[in-house]
Amino acid sequence: MTLRTYIVSRILLTIPMIFILLTTVFLIMRVLPGDPVLLHFEKMEDPALIAAMRVRLGLDKPLLMQYFDYLFGLFRGDLGKSMQDYSSIGQQIFAAFPATLELAIFSMLIAILIGIFLGVESSKAYNSPKDHLIRVFGIVTYAIPVFFLGMILQMIFGIGLHWLPVGGRTYQNMVPTGLNVGPVHFSTGLYTVDSILEGNILKLGTALKYLFLPSLTLGLVLCGIFIRLTRSNMFETLRLDFVTAAKARGLKDSTVTYGYALRNAFLPVLTMMGLQFALLLGGAVLTETTFSWPGLGRYLVDRINFRDYTAIQGVVVVFGLFVALVSLAIDLLYAYLDPRIRL
Amino acid sequence: MTQTKIRRSILSQLIPGITSLAKRGLAGWLVLIGAILTLSIIVLTVVSPWVSPYNPSAINVGHPLLPPTSQYLFGTDDLGRDMFSRVISGGGIMLQVSILSVIVCFIIGVPLGLFSSHTGGVVDKFFNLIMDSVYAFPGLILAIALALVLGRGVINLALSIAVIYIPSYFRVIRSQVLSIKEMPYVEAANAAGAKRRTILARYILPNTIPSIVVVATVNFADAILTAAGLTFIGMGVNATVPDWGWDLSNGRQLLLSGNWWVIAFPGLMIILLALGFTLMGEGLSELLNPRLEQSGE
């Protein structure tokens, strides 16, 4: 199989998965017992009002029609209208998405850095008290509810020491504008990237300060699996001949470990990143709620409080698509980095 | 092979974990500590009505937001409820939900995995695709959607959580069956004309039990954390029964003014319970399935 056929077949495989995903969400939200419009109103409400909402949201049509409306709408990037005020759900999700993306990127980065570092230390000290301690640390981080860890960190670094803010994304007047050259305006919605584009160090610092605790919270909860993976892979790699040879040539221990051995143990970490991404987004919903982080997760929880079923359906779909596309991207990257997959 | 012999072979796989745990190094200790943790929390929850100093739901038992004192060991919350009483009785719903969801996963995931992988062909491909899609979906978000549509209640919450973990059972069973299917003794049973149901129930299922035990313990820990998460964002069973997840959600607002005790103790209990199951799962997987640990799965 050439790289090109692999890429094409992997992309083709994503299509049925996305289709199943979209159908599952539709089945859950519309077909399972429990009429979303009635659920929205909870108590008895004027029947005329209920009927009017059905018509406006297209929920009066037969289910099959609703299904096609939903699929074609998605195809055009239309996620429907909110039950609360008939505003465009797509726009709201588009506005909230960068905050979640930024949190996801930084927490994944923190999880991998902590995971690889502790995993390497653990494998070097195999079966010693240090190794056991690191393993137990990995297990404990797995058992902590992410929102509780978030609150502990808020308590220590925010309320106790006053080092870091306990919530939000930045100060009111510190929102970076992105790149502004004459009439050209470009911004990503990622505050760290936008402040670099704007060339404003102060804004970058502020954005990072706000970003640090939420990403650390989510990163710590995710790092356990990376510790374990790095530990077992490095344990094998460190005993291979090329490592011994490198050591024999008098290279520094850290160069051998991080420069030579780790390079070989990195591909499984990449695969794990893809698998962990779904877990990360679930954790992001809770982390965003804890830190009042204005991303998709907080939007979801906010919509739940308004019993806004159409909006909830939209967010769930976007979360699912996000995971599917990230895992596709990681698989393609993997194929590019690992020539064996082409054979 | 007679029925008793099979039973003995399962036990002989499980018993080393029970008889000489401490001698088995770290893995043995993990199982032992995990079991003690979970059992003591379960016992505490069961006996809590008789041992809790105050009614956990009664308001104005003390002044609101008292820090821990000798009278109110874990302080009081914003409505003057005794946190110590709430902490020892707050695990009830979480335990019910997680036990029920593990049972549901087991009842659906195991037969489905056996059936699908043993049938093979298109049927297997179909179920595998469905299970992979569910597995790839962010679990908590799927559970939120389901819980929202199904409505409140222990059973509905358990069902919503169960759906996200069924694929784990399915996949473990499937991979086991695919390797066991090729074993000489299964081929021999086939050649001897044993019925398919007999082969599945007597020859294949018993061999998958160690892996299922490991998946179930991990599933327990996950179910507890998911239940806590759902309760935290306001999708719990109800607010009238004391619950650690609810206390954490309530305490989030109070934390900003420094009332750490409202969240610290309920949070610690969730950790201990989830940790108990995680430690057991970790230890068991090493004791029952030594290869699993080495491959880093």
Image (cartoon, coloured by chain):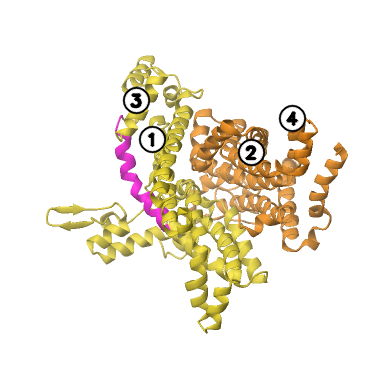
Outermost residue, left direction? A182
Residue linked to disc 3? A69
- Main SS, magenta region, reads helix
Tag in front: 1 or 4: 4
* Residue B206 image position (x, y, % from top left): 76, 41
Figure quadrant of residue A195: bottom left
Figure quadrant of residue A309: top left
Q: What numbered label is drawn on residue B197?
A: 4
* Residue under disc 3 on the same chain as residue under disc 4: no
Work out whether mark 4 precedes mark 2 in sequence or the reverse, and give the earlier one. Answer: 2
* Residue under disc 1 on the same chain as residue under disc 2: no
Q: Chain of mark 4?
A: B
Tag in front: 1 or 2: 1
**Element class at badge 2:** helix
Residue linked to disc 2? B93
Is residue A20 magenta-colored?
no
* Residue A233 image position (x, y, % from top left): 57, 63
Q: Is residue B169 above or below residue A230?
A: above
Residue linked to disc 1? A314
Q: Amino acid at mark 1?
A: Gly
Q: Are marks 3 and 1 in contact (CB under 8 Å)?
A: no
Q: Are marks 4 and 2 in contact (CB under 8 Å)?
A: no
